Image (spheres, grey):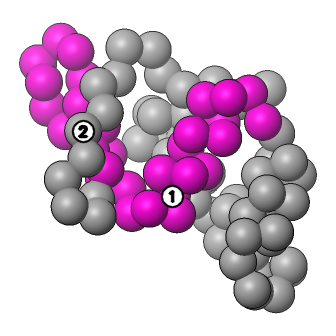
Amino acid sequence: VMTIKENLTERQIGERYFLYTPDNGSCVYIMNETSYKIYSFIKEGKNISEIIDKLFDEFDVDKKELETDINECIKDMINAGVVIQ
């Protein structure tokens, strides 16, 4: 089960979303609208296949390509310490 690191502060500026740490207020991650949706779905407790299904309904893309993009995005969030497995 994936979870979001606790105590991150979210801020939207234009079409970008920024995540900040509470301790020193430094920005730890920057997201576009799509990666923010993935982040939000993880926050809601959705698993990868649920996220793929939700975004596949929303975007007119190849499902395999979408799956690859979502997995890359989540891997990036894990490497940044935003998502915890």
Magenta residues, start to end:
17-46
Check the picture and name the quadrant holding the C terminus.
top right
Q: Nearer the viewer, residue 8 or 28?
A: 8
- Mark 2 crowd level (few <14, some 14–19, many ≥20, 10 Å Cα): few
Residue that badge 2 annotates? 11
Q: Secondary structure at mark 1?
A: helix
- Give yes or no for residue 23 being in the magenta stretch: yes
What is the three-letter code of the residue carrying label 2? Arg
In this rendering, does residue 6 appear at all? Answer: yes
Q: Which of label 2 and label 1 is nearer to you? A: 2
What is the three-letter code of the residue carrying label 1? Ser
Vertical order, 3 against 6 (above or below):
below
Vertical order, 1 against 35 (above or below):
above
Which residue is at 48% across, 22% downward?
Answer: 5
Q: With 25 as the anchor, is 21 left or right in this view?
A: right
Residue that badge 1 annotates? 35
Q: Position of residue 74 (x, y in %)?
A: 61, 51
Q: Position of residue 76 (x, y in %)?
A: 51, 54
In this rendering, does residue 28 appear at all? Answer: no
- Mark 1 crowd level (few <14, some 14–19, many ≥20, 10 Å Cα): some
Q: Nearer the viewer, residue 63 or 81?
A: 63
**Who comes first in sequence, dot 2 or dot 1?**
2
